[in-house]
Image (cartoon, rainbow, N blue to C red):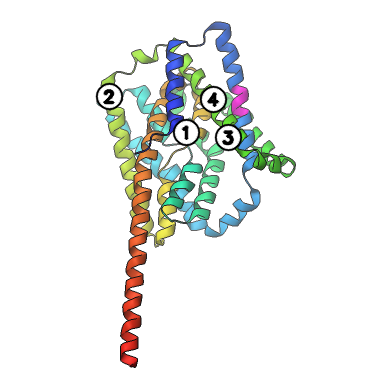
């Protein structure tokens, strides 16, 4: 049951914001830097995504449509159904954070890693995660505006315009400049990855600093936090079951089912945190809390499932090998 070291850094950043929140002029400086970091983050996303690979992946369109449906249809429907848990299990602000969690795109890196461990269709996982991230830049803010409305922290035409300027425009710029900077981005992938993660830590610090100033920890009691965790456990379990057995019902093979399960049941912390910062403003701290918890939970559970799928695959191969050997022996005996 691995604990992602990056989650430790995120929690440490939350602790730093709780002890030393940015206030006054410092808060303005941190907020401005965070805005620039988010724009640069999505610029790098655009520069990394290979247009040719994305177009090649369209050949497996049924799988990608299935993953997108899980990410942007089934997940949000479950999020809307969770409205009935307010106020027994969830406060209204925590529910809004949970609903936002169901709207963000799927992951790329962890979906690929777990699909590879489980011996699934890795190229499909790469394309599915990339498509989900690309679609999410447009769809997530639109779904948030439609489902969260004015109570979500100020959704309006101005907020959507800010999304376009801060997320979509840098992403498109990265795509347009990929021809000239794609090689540099690939060669310095490790170093730029640190920039990615550092940008997200800055977003978390900014969001929780604002939350501390506005009294976030007076709004979330241990009992409410436990209720949120219980709801997220059920949400993840339902999505893991739906993606696995639903893909089987749709006629997908084992390798494709593995890719669908890992790409269709996850939510991206890297994409969700910057979006929440833009969409929710001062309310972002409560909005990102469910996403941070769900992210660690999905990593722990999917790591166990991936190893189990790999063992099952080994057992299936051994069984097929044994059946093949018996067939050859039987054929040889009859021939003799």
| Residue range corresponding to the magenta coloring | 35-39
Q: Label 4: how many residues lie within 10 Å, few (<14), some (14-19) or many (20+)?
A: many
Determine the residue positioned at 44% across, 21% down. Answer: 12
- Which quadrant of the structure image shows residue 170? top right
Which comes before the other along the chain, label 1 or label 3?
3
Q: Label 1: how many residues lie within 10 Å, few (<14), some (14-19) or many (20+)?
A: many
Determine the residue positioned at 36% across, 25% down. Answer: 94
Quote the CA–CA distance across marks 2 and 3: 40 Å
- Residue that numbered label 2 is attached to: 87
Quote the CA–CA distance across marks 1 and 3: 14 Å
Of 191 and 245, nearer the camera is 191
Residue 87 drawn at (x, y percent): 27, 24
Q: Are marks 2 and 4 in contact (CB under 8 Å)?
A: no
Quote the CA–CA distance across marks 2 and 4: 27 Å
- Residue that numbered label 1 is attached to: 269
Height in image: 96 above or below 66? above
- Residue that numbered label 4 is attached to: 278
Select label 1 or label 2 by which is in front. 1
Element on which disc 2 rests: loop
């Amino acid at each position: 049951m691995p604990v992602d070291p990056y989650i430790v850094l995120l929690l440490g950043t939350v602790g730093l914001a709780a002890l030393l929140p940015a206030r006054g002029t410092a808060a303005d400086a941190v907020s401005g830097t965070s805005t620039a970091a988010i724009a640069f983050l999505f610029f790098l996303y655009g520069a990394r995504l290979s247009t040719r690979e994305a177009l090649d992946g369209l050949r497996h369109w049924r799988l990608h449509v299935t993953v997108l449906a899980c990410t942007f249809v089934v997940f949000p429907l479950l999020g809307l159904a969770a409205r009935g848990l307010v106020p027994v299990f969830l406060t209204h602000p925590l529910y809004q954070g949970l609903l936002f969690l169901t709207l963000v795109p799927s992951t790329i890196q962890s979906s690929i890693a777990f699909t590879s461990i489980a011996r699934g269709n890795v190229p499909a996982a790469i394309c599915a995660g990339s498509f989900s991230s690309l679609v999410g830049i447009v769809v997530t803010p639109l779904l948030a505006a439609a489902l969260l409305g004015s109570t979500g922290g100020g959704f309006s035409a101005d907020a959507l315009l800010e999304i376009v300027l801060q997320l979509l425009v840098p992403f498109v710029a990265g795509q347009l400049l990929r021809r000239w900077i794609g090689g540099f981005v690939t060669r310095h992938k490790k170093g730029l990855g640190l920039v990615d993660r550092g940008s997200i830590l800055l977003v978390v610090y900014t969001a929780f600093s604002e939350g501390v100033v506005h009294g976030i920890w007076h709004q979330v009691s241990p009992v409410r936090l436990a209720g949120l965790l219980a709801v997220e456990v059920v949400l993840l379990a339902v999505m893991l079951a739906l993606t696995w057995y639903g893909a089987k019902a749709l006629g997908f093979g084992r390798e494709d089912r593995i890719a669908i399960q890992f790409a269709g049941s996850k939510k991206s912390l890297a994409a969700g945190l910057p979006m929440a910062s833009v969409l929710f403003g001062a309310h972002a701290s409560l909005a990102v809390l469910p996403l941070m918890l769900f992210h660690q939970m999905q990593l722990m559970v999917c790591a166990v499932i991936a190893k189990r799928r790999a063992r099952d695959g080994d057992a299936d191969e051994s069984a097929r090998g044994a059946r093949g050997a018996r067939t050859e022996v039987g054929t040889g005996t009859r021939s003799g």
